[in-house]
Image: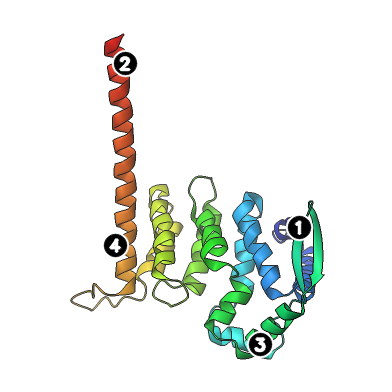
Amino acid sequence: MLCMLPALEDQNSEILKKVEHILKETELIVGTSEFYGEVWKAMLRTPRARLSAIRYLDKHIPSNLKKAQELRDKNHIYISEYTIKIVNREVALTKDESKHQRETAMRLQMQLHDMLYFFYPNKSKLVINALISGLSIAEPQVYVNRSTLDFLISHMPVNANINSIQENIKLVECASLAYTKKDFATLNKIQNWLFEHLDEDLDEIDPKDPTIITIVESQKNLFRKSMDVKYIQKGSSAGQNIGVNAN
C-alpha cells in the first residue's frame, strides 16, 4: 500500500491506470473494509503517503448513504472471506466464515452503520486520528491540509450525522489551528466546512444547532489547552527565578 499510494501522484497516465487497477484488485481480494482500513492506516502513519491517500479516499469513498447503496447495487462493495493477522511480522490470512456471513448481511441491508463499517473501519479511532493527522500544522503539508478539508466538506459535513459531536469537536479543534498558517485556500475551505449550511438571513442562531455546539466546545477546549500551557510556562519561569535567586 505504501508503494502504491504515492505512485498515484505520477503524471504518467499509463502508470496511473495500472496503479488504480492494482488497488481495485487488492480491494476485491481482501474485501472493502480491510482495504480501506489499510488506506486509512497509511494516511495516519506515513506522511509521504498522506496526500495521495486522502485524495484516493475522497475519490473512491461514497459521499453519502445513497451512493453507497448504488455501489452495492453495482457489486462494487466486496466481502472479505479472511481475517488478516500479523504474526512475527508476517501477514497471515485465516478463513473466516462468520465474518463472510456478517459482511454479506451488512452489504445487503446497507444502512448508515454498514457504510461506516465498509469505508470507515474503526472510525472513532483510526479514521478520526487519520483526519487529524491530515489537518495537523506540525508539518509543512499545506496540500494535505487542503485535501483533508476537501474530504470533510464532501463526505463529513459538520451538520450531517456521519460523525458524533465529540468526533467533530476534535476535527474542528485541529482545523481551527490551521488559521495560524494564513493560507487563503485553507481558510476558505474551513469557512465552507463550518458555515456553508448556515442561513445568512437568520436573525438569530439556534444555540442548540449541533454545528454551533461543536464550534463552541472546540474553542473552549483550545482555550483550556492554551491556558494550561501558559500556566506550565509561568510555573517553569518562576521555578527558574527561584533557582537563580537561591544561587
Residue type at the position of mark 1: Ile
As measured in the structure, the alpha-carbon distance from the residue carrying label 1 to the one carrying label 2 is 52 Å
Task: Please tell me whether mark 4 sits on a helix, a strand or a loop.
Answer: helix
- Residue 113 location in percent, x, y? 54, 80
Query: Any mark on residue 105, and which?
Result: 3
Q: Are marks 4 and 2 in contact (CB under 8 Å)?
A: no
User: Callout 1: 10 Å neighbours few (<14), some, many (20+)?
Assistant: few
Q: Give the answer, above or below, for where 203 lies relative to 143.
A: below
Image quarter (top left, top right, bottom left or bottom right) of the N terminus: bottom right
Mark 1 vs mark 4: which is more N-terminal?
1
Task: Specify the amino acid type for callout 4.
Answer: Val
Structural crowding at the residue carrying mark 4, measured as other residues with C-alpha within 10 Å and reported as few (<14), some (14–19) or many (≥20): some
Point out the tag, 4 or 2, that comes first from the N-terminus: 4
- Mark-to-mark CA distance, 1 and 4: 42 Å
Which mark lies nearer to you, 4 or 2? 2
Residue 99 vertical position relative to residue 186 in the rendered view, above or below = below
Residue that mark 2 sits on: 243
The mark nearer the N terminus, 1 or 2, is 1
Find disc 1 in the rendering and name its residue: 86
Secondary structure under badge 3? helix
Whole-percent x and y of residue 247?
Answer: 31, 8
Q: Secondary structure at mark 2?
A: helix
| Residue in front for this viewpoint, 2 or 51 | 2
Which comes before the other along the chain, label 2 or label 3?
3
Q: Residue furthest left?
A: 203
Residue contact at pointers 3 and 4, CB within 8 angstroms: no
Q: Amino acid at mark 3?
A: Ala
In front: 119, or 5? 119
Q: Earlier in the sequence, mark 3 or mark 4?
A: 3
Q: Which mark is residue 216?
A: 4
